[in-house]
Image: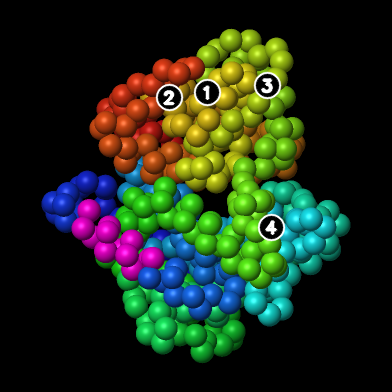
Amino acid sequence: MSSAGRSQLPGGSTERSADRTSGASEFAERLLTVLADGAFTSTYKYAVLLGLVDLCVEQSTRTGGAPTSVTTRQLAERILELYWPQVRLFDERLLQQNSGNQAAILTKILRFQNQVGEPGISVARARHLAPDEFARLVRDIEWTLVEMPLPKLQRVGSEQVHFLYRINWSDDIRRSTFMSRDFDNAIRFIGNAGEDLVRLAPFVRPLVQREWSGLVGRFNGLAEARLEQFLFGAPREAIAHLAEPLLQLQGGNCFYCGRRVRQRREVDHFVPWSRHPDNGLDNLVVTDAACNNAKRDHLAAAEHVERWAERNQQREVELAQIADVKQWSHRPRRTLSVARSIYLRLPADARLWQIQREFVAVDAPRLRSVLGAAS
């Protein structure tokens, strides 16, 4: 099977900034054309788009560059994580995500959770409790993606418009071919598509989530307002139980201001959920309510990034132990790649949150030093 490649460092090419902007604009226009096609009969194409965006961010290089390819297995694992919380009941019913029968991926996930005996179980705990069955679930999801949305995502009307990726199979592929050792599972990005996905991620993600929520609303006869939060919102209640061990790791102090946390301790996504949905333990810190309310969805300043990177590196063993005890996701490399992909692309005039209502300029050399040296 093929492995994911790497692109060159952002800004390292000789093409002019105006050319890069023009290329990203053309890419965005083609993406909007695909989203506006109107032929979506399930939410799979939206899931594939978000999955590819997330993988490009999560598989970044040490300098923040996007990958040149990803694999169908990686995509299957990412899409499983996207759909996993969506099998919860919404107003006492499972939401329909297909125009006919329920989408197969959701049915398989729900069946697996029922077999394990813990509806709503976390992905990390499910993988721990039933590793063989979990691996089969991922393989089944991978086949569904290979057979259905991947060959069809770039189709507008009856025409294939290849601008995002190329794959070495068509939509008449048989499962026996997929299961063979010779199957080429690479999803190869065309030109700068990987870079464009990362560059446009802050805009693509909310747009796709809104379109996804709208389609689910139409399938189920529901308004969109509550659906988007249900489908994609940060599960605050799910991470609250991690506050105690993380606070002990921080010596009982707020991660940002350093003051003792006595009441209303809160768990914050260091890289904001709105930027990238990473619930991994390395992306979580404990704050007091005042700092958490002030930081909100802002990116933290370089000094916070430095302290965060040092914590994750120096306390890696303790974080792994917490993850093991709590059966929680712990993927330090993925979390670090997300931070690199976002922070190392910031424009020079961006402002980062320092404390309370204070914002500071981007310290690019310090960020490059901290995130480039981290491992």
Q: Residues within 10 Å of mark 2 (few under 14, many from 20)?
A: many
**Sequence-first tag of 3 and 2:** 3
Residue 87's x, y, as percent? 73, 59
**Gap between marks 2 and 4, in whole Å?**
32 Å
Looking at the rendering, the stretch of residues picked out in magenta corresponds to: 21-32
Q: Quadrant of the C terminus?
A: top left
Q: What residue do we see at 37% from left, 74% from top?
A: 166
Q: What residue do we see at 52% from left, 62% from top?
A: 211
Q: Is residue 55 visible?
A: no
Nearer mark to the viewer, of 3 and 1: 1
Q: Nearer the viewer, residue 312 or 118?
A: 118
Q: Which colouring convention does the figure follow? A: rainbow
Q: Are marks 4 and 3 in contact (CB under 8 Å)?
A: no
| Residue located beneath label 2 in the image | 353
131 left or right, relative to 59: right
Q: Nearer the viewer, residue 71 or 357?
A: 357
